[in-house]
Image: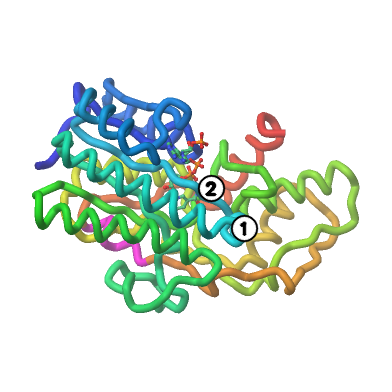
Amino acid sequence: MSLGTLTDRTILVTGGHGFLGSFVVEALRARGANRLLLPRHSELDLLDRDRVRQTLLAERPDAIIHLAAVVGGIGANRRHPGKFFYENLVMGVELLEAARLAGVGKIVTVGTICAYPKFTPVPFKEDDLWIGYPEETNAPYGIAKKALLVMGQAYRQEYGQNAVYLLPVNLYGPRDDFDPSTSHVIPALIRKMVDARRAGQPEVEVWGDGSPSREFLHARDAARGIVMALEGYDDPEPVNLGTSQEITIKDLAELIQRLTGYEGRLVWNPDQPNGQPRRCLDTSRAAERFGFRAEIGFEAGLRETIAWWESEGT
Ligand SMILES: NC(=O)c1ccc[n+]([C@@H]2O[C@H](COP(=O)([O-])OP(=O)(O)OC[C@H]3O[C@@H](n4cnc5c(N)ncnc54)[C@H](OP(=O)(O)O)[C@@H]3O)[C@@H](O)[C@H]2O)c1
């Protein structure tokens, strides 16, 4: 069953107060959604099976966008592989089962590029998701989230559940997590360089050797893609959300250095892990199936993010 218009549909967004969630809520409202359920973690712990079932049976939403997750950069993934595996898996499992019991019409689960095998041929195609094991530092997180793809497909097959699965590439934008103990690479670099510029530090340490490549999608673009899939995509196959534009960490660090106006030296620390060697998505499926293409240019998006951090974040 396709959801069609969002007006007067009850839509539950898990993680709706998080970084990506804040943009998804904006995108939903822009598309006319006027009945949003946005429980905070403190109000509805998705690890609590009874509460999840009670809530869905009481509210009976027409659709769910599942964004809630425990997330972080390489450091956080290495410190908490058990938590990242357990919580990401169980949250999704309990939610999908409760949604089935409550007769929820559609579920959009947001996965992650960390689900891809370490040595996926570039650009990553959705059909290559299962050709190998993910990069070790983020495998527990990536596999837990990938299991939810299998669950959604199994529920579609057995119960006719309309479960859709999206794979966003690395996200960035205003309101991102800038806490150095959990942040991803872009906020980590922005914070280091802004702090160093303000303190007049002569050098900044950067993790790894700068050789890996990454692709980045502005969270506002990702949110638009998620809402487009909610409105117009009903197939079992997972779909990448990205830009298809690859940049090395070295080039990224130098770009952020230029945009933050930091004039010191970048010192690479090869003792710290690089993470996955390359990341770049084939984004043709999203364009073909529901017309999604990223719109925000990378340099413009970075400028916006840096401006937000300098004015509101610090
Ligand atoms: N950021 C990226 O680069 C990226 C890339 C690809 C995919 N994704 C996916 O996008 C989604 C959103 O990520 P994000 O970066 O926006 O993360 P985020 O800001 O940390 O948001 C995650 C949200 O989940 C909530 N949450 C965590 N555990 C919960 C629980 N047990 N019960 C209820 N809520 C819980 C958190 O609430 P509290 O903060 O109150 O705990 C938070 O609001 C995730 O599924 C992630 O895997 C993110």
As drawn, the label of residue 172 is 2
Q: Is residue 37 above or below residue 221?
A: above
Residue 138, x across and y down, in percent:
51, 64
Determine if the magenta segment contains residue 285: yes
Identify the residue at image location x=37%, y=27%: 38
Q: Is residue 233 above or below residue 52?
A: below
Q: Is residue 131 above or below residue 303?
A: below
Q: Between residue 312 and residue 262, name the one nearer to us.
A: 312
Residue 284, x across and y down, in percent:
29, 63
Give the residue furthest to the front: 50
Q: Between residue 277 and residue 66, name the one nearer to us.
A: 66
Mark 2: give few (<14), some (14-19) or many (20+) Cα within 10 Å.
Answer: many
Q: Which residue is mark 1?
A: 79
Is residue 258 left or right of 122 when viewed as pictured? right
Residue 32, x across and y down, in percent:
27, 25
Identify the residue at image location x=73%, y=54%: 258
- Tell me the magenta residue range: 282-288
Is residue 296 left or right of 158 when viewed as pictured? right
Label 2 amino acid? Answer: Tyr
Q: Is mark 2 within 8 Å of ligand 1?
A: yes
